[in-house]
Every structure is written in structure tokens, then in C-alpha cells.
Image: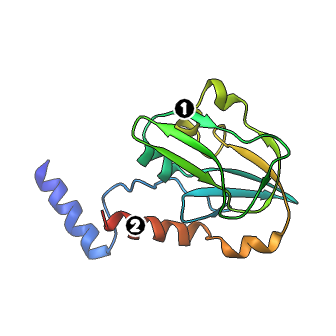
Amino acid sequence: MACRQLWASRAASYLRISVFHRGFSNVIKDFKYVDSHEWVKVDGNYATIGITDHAQDHLGDVVYVELPEVGAAVTQGGSFGALESVKATTDINSPISGEVVEVNEALNSSPALVNSSPYKNGWIIKVEINDSGELNNLMDSEQYSKFCEEEDSKH
């Protein structure tokens, strides 16, 4: 077994690939990301917002989600809620400005959806976008993956 792992490591080194699993293994190609680890999925003039797989992995088990009210205004980079986990409490920042048109009420009774399904069932809010030009300030999946890689290498 050890010989097989040594061979795999040498082969990976030769091919310049990593054999270690990354903590941010789940990044969705068509989403946009911010350095505070929120994602945005755009559908016309509306955006769905949540936290990334990388963020939920570092937070640990989420036990409470503070949601904004429908109709509340959110601004790009501004806090609109909070997540409480077994490890920490952190603000949730909006990747884009707009008006909250829907909140994920399921998170009130099942906050762990943020952990088990951060990109599907664990979404946090839906927003009507004020300025689609703000999307140009966000990272694509490749940029976000590289950002996470660099961030993790510092720890």
C-alpha cells in the first residue's frame, strides 16, 4: 500500500497535479463569487445568494441563520444577515446590490441545509438586481478556486 501511494505521489509530482483533496472542492462553474465566500447565481434580473462550500466547510455545523426581511435593500459588500455555527458566528455579505424578494424560510427550521447543500437547498436569499454592472466586480469559478487555494496555503 505504501509503495502504491509513493508511486502515485511521484506520478502526480511528475504530472504536476495534486493528489490531496482540497477543502473547497465544490465550486460551480456558472456562479460568481466574492472573497468573503458568498456566491451568486444570476437568472435574468434576479440573483440567488448563498455561502460557498468552502465557507461552510470552515464554519462547521451551522446551527442558526439570521435572515433579512423581504423588501429589505442589500448593497454589494454589505452585511444582510449572519450564520452561527458550532465554531463561530459570521456575517453574510451580499455580492450584489438589490432588493430582497425571497428568503429561504426552510433555513429557520433546518439551518444545516447550508452545510449539506450550500448551492441548492441551502441558498439564503433571492434579490432583484439594481445594477448588473456590479457583476463585473465578482470572481468567476476559476478565480475563486485560485483565491481559496492561496488563502488555504497561508494557514
Q: Is residue 70 left or right of residue 111?
A: right
Q: Which residue is mark 1?
A: 112
Up-down relation of residue 81 to residue 104 (above or below): below
- For label 2, the residue is 151
Instruction: Report crowding for label 2: few under 14, some 14 to 19, many 20 or more residues within 10 A (C-alpha).
Output: few
Q: Residue at x 72, y 76 (%)?
A: 136
Number of disc labels: 2
Q: Residue at x 43, y 42 (%)?
A: 88
Residue at the image position 45 percent from the left and 55 percent from the top: 24
Distance of label 1 from label 2 (alpha carbons)? 25 Å
Q: Quadrant of residue 111?
A: top right
Instruction: From the viewer's side, name the closer residue of 57 and 63.
Output: 63
75 or 122: nearer the viewer: 75
What is the residue that sits farthest to the left in this orientation? 3
Give the position of the C terminus as an image quadrant.
bottom left
Q: Position of residue 32 (x, y in %)?
A: 66, 64
